[in-house]
Image (tube, rainbow, N blue to C red):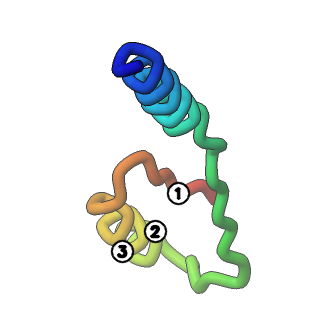
């Protein structure tokens, strides 16, 4: 009886791992940001450096 429980747990763990790998991409859009010059754009770039996978576009 121990073997079926172990196989069931292995299957559940496998499903959880597979579900974690299939997370959707998250997109955040910020509108109306003050970007009048290169110094403003540089400030935004500096703020985004600490965020993994984040990119700023104008």
Badge 3 or badge 1: first in the primary sequence: 3
User: Which mark is drawn over residue 43?
Assistant: 3
Label 2 sits on a secondary structure element that is helix
Residue drawn at the location 44% of the way across and 77% of the way down: 40
Q: How far is disc 3 from disc 1 in space, using C-alphas?
A: 11 Å
Picture disc at residue 41: 2
Q: Which mark is residue 56?
A: 1
Residue at left 56%, top 77%? 35
In the depicted view, which residue is nearer to us: 11 or 31? 11
Residue 29, numbered circle: none
| Residue at the (57%, 35%) spot, across then down | 19
Mark 1 vs 2: CB contact within 8 A: yes
In the rendered structure, are the residues bearing label 2 and label 3 in contact, judged by CB atoms less than 8 Å apart? yes
Label whose residue precedes the other's in the sequence (1 or 2):
2
Closer-to-camera residue (53/48) = 53
Instruction: Say what secondary structure mark 3 lies in.
Output: helix
């Amino acid at each position: 009886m121990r073997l079926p429980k172990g196989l069931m747990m292995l299957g559940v763990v496998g499903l959880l791992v597979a579900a974690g790998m299939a997370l959707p991409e998250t997109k955040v859009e910020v509108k109306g940001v003050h970007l009048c010059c290169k110094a403003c754009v540089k400030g935004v770039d500096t703020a985004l450096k600490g965020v993994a996978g984040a990119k700023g576009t104008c």
